[in-house]
Amino acid sequence: MKLKRIMALLSMIIFTCSVATAQNFKYIGAAKCKMCHNKPQKGEQYNKWKAGPHANAMKSLSATEAKDPKCLKCHSTAGAIDPKLKGGIQTTEGVSCEACHGPGSAYKAPAIMKNQKLALTKGLIIPDEELCKSCHNPESPTFKGFNYEEYMAQIAHDDPLTK
């Protein structure tokens, strides 16, 4: 009986400590991602993003829309997050790397990025159709349907070193 109580107490202490020390991953901004993800051998992902619709999402909004939280939640990663988590990210970045891949403060180090399992524990997200549909959905006044495979092909920015 005492052993069960001790185990329960230890479990509660461990849980409380883990909650108390849980990290709030911060958004670092596309400029930090560019440092590694703009090299030719890595596939120049930053340049592909910069030329694409996500980086330019804010440009499609009027001045009034650019201040509207309903528009910002999908047109700007920085406009959609808790202000306390804004490390180096700017609203003008539009839909940045971290909208799809998660806040990078804890997984940005090359040693962590080389270990996907570890990076996933540090906030890395592997984007999927459901994540895309959080913005590409009928709530949007400009929604015209969403074909995941078709749109993913248009924004593809694979890292040739991971194939």
Image (tube, rainbow, N blue to C red):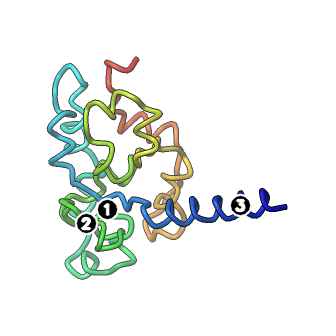
Where does label 2 land, which residue?
Answer: 86
- Numbered mark located on residue 6 in the image: 3
Q: Quadrant of residue 26?
A: bottom left
Q: Nearer the viewer, residue 92 or 35?
A: 35
Q: CA distance from mark 2 to mark 3?
A: 41 Å
Counting from the top left corner in percent of width and height, residue 130 is at 56, 51
Mark 1 or 2: the one toward you = 2
- Numbered mark located on residue 67 in the image: none
Q: CA distance from mark 1 to mark 2?
A: 10 Å
Query: Looking at the rendering, in which quadrant would you find the N terminus?
Result: bottom right
Q: Nearer the viewer, residue 137 or 6?
A: 6
Q: Amino acid at mark 1?
A: Thr
Vertical side of 160 occupied by 28: above or below:
below
Mark 2 and mark 3 lie on one chain; the one further toward the N terminus is 3
Q: Quadrant of residue 24?
A: bottom left
Identified at 63% across, 59% down, the residue is: 10
Identified at 22% across, 62% down, the residue is: 87
Q: Nearer the viewer, residue 82 or 14?
A: 14
Counting from the top left corner in percent of width and height, residue 29 is at 21, 54
Counting from the top left corner in percent of width and height, residue 38 is at 17, 33
Q: Amino acid at mark 2?
A: Lys
Q: Is residue 99 left or right of residue 90?
A: right
Mark 3 and mark 1 lie on one chain; the one further toward the N terminus is 3
Identified at 52% across, 51% down, the residue is: 146
What is the secondary structure assignment of the residue under circle 1? helix
Q: Amino acid at mark 3?
A: Ile
Where does label 1 land, which residue?
Answer: 77
Identified at 33% across, 34% down, the residue is: 112
Disc 3 crowd, CA 10 A, few/some/many (<14, 14-19, 20+): few
